Amino acid sequence: MIETRELTKLFKDVRAVDGINLTVARGELVALLGPNGAGKSTTLRMLTTLIPPTSGSAQVAGFDVVRQQRDVRLRIGYIGQGNGAGHSQRGRDELISQGRAYGMTVRAARTRAAELIDSLGLSDVADRTVSTLSGGQRRRLDIAMGLIHAPELLFLDEPSTGLDPQNRANLQEHIVRLRAEHGTTIVLTTHYLDEADSMAERVIVIDHGRVIADDSPQQLKAKHVGDRVILGFAGSEEAARAAAAIGAQHEGGFIRLTAEDGPREAPKILASLPITPTSIEVTRPTLDDVFLTLTGRSLREDSSTPAAELVEA
Amino acid sequence: MTSLVTDTRVVFSRELRPVIRDPFSVIFSMIQPLFFLGLFAPLLPGDNSLQWFVPGIIVMSCLFGSSMTGSNLLFEMQTGSHERMLVTPLRRPALLIGRALKEIVPMIAQAALIVAVCIPFGFELHLPGALLGLLILAAFCIGLGALSYTLALAAKNKEWLFWTVQQTLIFPLLLLAGVLLPLDNGPGWLRALSHINPMTYVVNAERALFNGDVLTRSTLEGVIAATVVAVLGLLIGVRAMQRSD
Ligand SMILES: Nc1ncnc2c1ncn2[C@@H]1O[C@H](COP(=O)(O)OP(=O)(O)OP(=O)(O)O)[C@@H](O)[C@H]1O
Ligand SMILES: [Mg+2]
């Protein structure tokens, strides 16, 4: 569905996207994950024909993004980082003109708009001027606009930013269902690690315009971080004795071990210890741990990321 | 299969919708022209000064409205809805032409309003001429609208740039077209500048037409000037839209 070769975009001297090779098969649900300024939006903007690559090429839905723009546009849906719906318009009107833009008849667009308004919980606000909607309502309207023509390939740039947890869950469900029912290929970017983790079966980690990892969340975590087993002891002496018995190091009253499959290995570790620990903790890594391992920086907003990078784009 | 015409219709009706839903927005760009009408016209000498002044004010309100219209696009470029439309299969020229064509609707509403306000004060309406006058104005405001959108596309996210250029241009255009004062007795250089201002010819044509003089040289010059503005505006605008990202 998507095939890029050395896709690159330079803005003056900024390498926003730096030689990305990407293959996405029909029906995949892929999440692009990366910090602010990593090049996620720029990548999507090239794939959706909005901006031409500086070098390299991309085929989307079977067509070249530079030479066959219209063919690409007819087959994709795009929900950008901003608000797709015009602020002076009414939601329902925008949905209908969006449908018309894709060649639907007024009648078909109207029916489809009504369906989407209903399923995205917009019934109360669809006939109001967009500027009076809350951020989350506007976001849901944008999503409805991207879905109006039921595209075979859908790009979403931070679809859930600004949504409350309930609406975020609702949106995720919508996306997963879309894929299950229509086999839609979906490429989304997100800052929410749990979202990438729970929805996508493939996560592409981008940093400084490059792909630094590309795998399923499980594999990424197993490969790059692994599980952690932390044993607590009554005191540092006990910990030292236990550590000696299993050939590990202790830090004060604790022993920290890494394991491929923590929950299964923990009982075995326990059995091999000469003394019983006072506590045991098995932690599974998050995608943030993966990112931390890969780049030495954290993606999570509440951690030590420099403040400047946290400013919303 | 959609065509350029269908695409243009989609864009046109989308643009028109907020105007219809909120007709008051049409009045907004008329505030200044109405002030000129109310405070300036009484100062003009002669009995039928309105007959001379009103057509100019109609052109003025067309100039104000159409030259501001790019700010709507500017705003949509900032919020993201322009980007959203660029990703649809709508043909790029349609994105500009549809928008520019919409300018006709507020222009006609404004002209009708101004005429309606002035009739009780002795303004005489010669309908056939006035209708032809509106046709010329339609072409003129399509061109102006297209240029205003071009300016918006060029200014991108620099809103101040759009407004600075727009404000800097409209007043010379206005004064050099002799809308407020006749330039016939002005110095040569002023008249020379006025001769290269296409709006001069549009204003003169409107004056003749609203006065009922249809078959005049002014009419012909007005038609030519308005057509040139429309064609140039659309050509430049479509190019700018094709490069937009
Ligand atoms: N139009 C532009 N002109 C100049 N530089 C740009 C432009 N668009 C993006 N950049 C730069 O390219 C880099 C990548 O930006 P991009 O918007 O793709 O990041 P992102 O991964 O989407 O970030 P975010 O998570 O903040 O949305 C950034 O350094 C950004 O400043
Ligand atoms: Mg982005």
Image (spheres, helix red, strand yellow):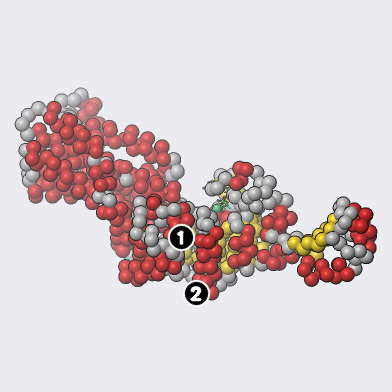
Please give the chain letter of the residue carrying mark 1: A
Quadrant position of residue A89: bottom left
Q: Secondary structure at mark 2?
A: helix
Q: In which quadrant of the rendered image does the N terminus of chain B lie?
A: bottom left
The residue drawn where x is 82% and y is 61% is A279
User: Residue B20, which numbered label?
Assistant: none
The residue drawn where x is 23% and y is 27% is B190
Spatial CA distance of label 2 from label 1 is 20 Å
Q: Residues within 10 Å of mark 2 (few under 14, many from 20)?
A: few
| A234 shown above or below A199 | above
Please give the chain letter of the residue carrying mark 2: A
Q: Secondary structure at mark 1?
A: helix
* Front label number (2 vs 1): 1
In the picture provided, is A289 more to the left or to the right than A145? right
Is tag 2's residue or tag 1's residue first in the polypeptide sequence?
1
Amino acid type of the residue that numbered disc 1 sits on in the rendered structure: Arg
Circle 1 residue: A140
Amino acid type of the residue that numbered disc 2 sits on in the rendered structure: His
Residue B72 placement (x, y as % from top left): 36, 47
Q: Residues within 10 Å of mark 1 (few under 14, many from 20)?
A: many
| A90 shown above or below B207 | below
Circle 2 residue: A182
In the picture provided, is A45 more to the left or to the right than A214? left
Q: Residue furthest top?
A: B187
